[in-house]
Amino acid sequence: MSILALRREVIEIPKNYKYFCISEHFNEKNEIVKFSHISESFKRLFTGLYVSIRPEQKLLYYDLVNGPCLNIRKAIVEMGGSIISTDLFSVYYLMLQQPSGCEDGTLLVNGCSNYFFTQFSLPLPELLGINKGPKGWVVSLTKICPSDLEHFYSGHRIFRSL
């Protein structure tokens, strides 16, 4: 039985025409996208880093279904067997569509999490979590180790670049 459900067609993320400074956009003082909290691990890893100029990207998302608790490794297998990172320009673009973290849209605002795989510190990927907070978005970052049994509950959403 599948633990994932593909919920939408492809999400088009526009071309990034200039270098995207992560810490200039992902910060609590941002006046366009509101943030309740950004984890220290996110700040440590991404302060001073940029996303390069790149062509448009496409994302798919999957909702976790069928069970109260799921193993992330099984979800990765169902998404094609490998982790495909999503850059932070793409994540921020989705947040711009829901700037206060309350608007309906692609990102969940119902108490469940939105997860993106990033890969800035090889060889282990990180799992970026975006949640609705009391005053905007909450951003967290977790390193995924091969031995981890990361568990997620039904209702959460996982994004994957194509």
Image (spheres, rainbow, N blue to C red):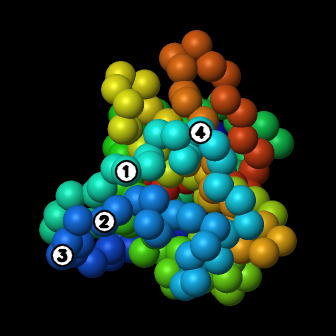
Whether label 1 touches label 3, CB < 8 Å: no
Task: Look at 36% across and 46% down and name the residue there.
Answer: 85
Mark 2 falls on what kind of element?
strand
- Tell which tag, 2 or 1, sits nearer the viewer: 1
- Residue topped by disc 2: 20
- The numbered mark at residue 48 is 1
Mark 4 falls on what kind of element?
helix
Residue 13's place in the image compared with 127, above or below, is: below
N-term mark: 3 or 4: 3
- Tell which tag, 3 or 4, sits nearer the viewer: 4
Q: Inspect the image, locate mark 3, and give the three-letter code of the amino acid beneath it.
A: Tyr
Q: Inspect the image, locate mark 1, and give the three-letter code of the amino acid beneath it.
A: Gly
Task: Look at 77% across and 45% down and name the residue there.
Answer: 153
- Residue topped by disc 3: 17
- Quarter of the picture containing the N terminus is top right
Question: How far from the left and from the top, in percent, is residue 81?
Answer: 39, 33
* Separation of residues labelled 2 and 1 (CA atoms): 10 Å
* Separation of residues labelled 3 and 4 (CA atoms): 28 Å
Whether label 2 touches label 4, CB < 8 Å: no
N-term mark: 2 or 1: 2
- The numbered mark at residue 41 is 4
